[in-house]
Amino acid sequence: MNLTREPESYPRPQNVPAWLGRKVIFLARGMGRALMLLASAVRTIFPHAFTVRARREIGNQMYIGGIMSLGVVTVVALFTGMILALQTGIELRRFGQEVFIGSAVMMSMLREMGPFMSGIILAASVGASIAAQMGTMVVSEEIAALEVMSISPVRFLVMPRLVAMAIMTPLLSLYGCLMGVLGGGIVGETQLGVAWAAYIQNSTRFVGVKDVYVGMLKAFVFGIIIVIVACHEGFGTTNGAVGVGNSTRRSVVISFLAILISGFFITRFFYV
Amino acid sequence: MIRFDRVSKSLLGRLVLNDVSFEVAKGASLAIVGPSGAGKSVTLKHMICLLRPDVGSVEIGGDAISEARGSELDRIRRRFGVLFQSSALLEWLTVAENVALPLREKTAMSEEDIISTVNERLRLVGLEEDREKHPSELSGGMKKRAGLARALAEDPEIVLYDEPTSGLDPVSARSIDNLINTTRKDLGVTSVVVTHDLHSALSVGTSIAMIYRGAIVEMCSPSEFVRSENDIVQQFLKAQYITDSGAWEIKQ
């Protein structure tokens, strides 16, 4: 897949339908290119992902994308769990059912909040960082240099990040769920008078295997979206430093939207 | 070795190359000069198929690179080493790792052979002592040298230089010129140097092509170039204080 593209210019649209039509065409083209990038990256996994250099790079990216995000995921998940427990606990107390906050927190975190939260955090941190790095590499001709050396940037740069994030996003999501449940438990014990043992017992009472695997699947899809959107936007960078900033901003916005929309459709597919 | 046949190219609605034809013989060194925006770098990018012509064709040793795709394009590109204007070194790798990159990624060479080749190339460009440094720790001239060492790593038949002396002080610029000449003579490579530095072009080129507004207005030997009566060439020579062709020949 050739990533070095010729600069493009188009005449200014003369009316609103022309402007709208162009937006639709650009959206379709961008999605097509991103899917082609994903297909190219997936094709390189099995012949190349197990070489020593690739394994080392995947490990490095897992550390950058996963381990380095642990701190922020811990804080966000802990407080999300605490807020969930507090809000649901206050309402449930009116009916004397505050003991069920464990179920509410666990189900919310496993099904939606865990994957969504880790997806958003990683899109804003790791995704932005990938887009900025790829954009800078385009501007400083490093991507062109790789192509001229016949080293595929997709294999060399995209594939290790894709594999790393496809592994780390579900793990971070699961970790976030546990932290959220822990936060809910702390609020239950200290603010709502729900004993720790009762909280834990209720947390696991209604959880099914489906809740776990659908949540993990969502996080897996979000991880892929973040890397592909970031790389696609980064590779499309033009106009130097300003262009790198624009690519990074676009990468974060598009990833957020794609995470929200795909999250809805996965939920719709599995639960309706 | 390199053949441009009536190549035209438009970018952003502007005609950047207009019916350009020339040939570079094996082992020769062509310096392409011209003002900024004249089409020098676009010409270079056509040679390695980073751009494709709208009209015409580009051939490398009989292979039409302008038509090649996929593995065929990779095969033709392997004949090239390219020194980019920004050096294009990967920032997270050391100098030695940058030079070893094409060998590690594309060849089945043993690690000992790779290290030996890297050492040899770094010795050639005078960077043996800086092998463990990262690009951010190098000066502009050192980055160019490291970029050249990487370009030479795979024993290319053709080396392309995009503005090799831009942004360098005169001493460093002349040392890069010497390196280009040494590389061509010692390794027998064909060179194409794109530059707006006429002093550099006159010292590294066995022939010089002047591009102006997308067309070649003069292509001849350096000694003929400084005597050219073409107005654009004369203007370019005067702008770089090369007004006394006899003095230039004595210096050579």
Image: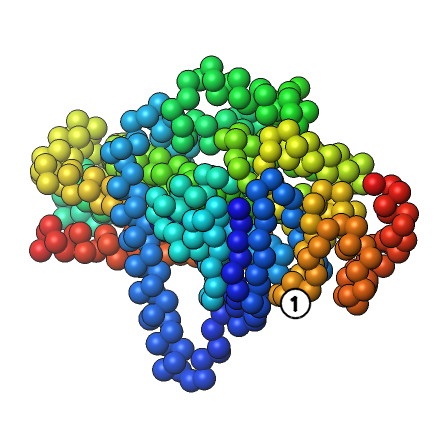
Is B231 situated left or right of B33 in this image? right
- Amino acid on which the number 1 mark rests in the picture: Arg
Picture residue at 16% right of the left edge, 38% below the top: A212
* A201 shown above or below B75: above
Nearer-the-camera pick, B84 or B62: B62
Is A27 situated left or right of B246 in this image? left
Label 1: chain?
B
Q: Secondary structure at mark 1?
A: loop
Is A212 situated left or right of B81 in this image? left
Measuring from the top left, give residue A68's x and y in whole percent: 42, 31
Picture residue at 73% right of the left edge, 38% below the top: B177
Measuring from the top left, give residue B7's x and y in whole percent: 52, 63
Identify the residue under disc 1.
B213
Is B209 situated left or right of B245 in this image? left
Q: Is residue B132 visible?
A: no
Q: Residue furthest top?
A: B112
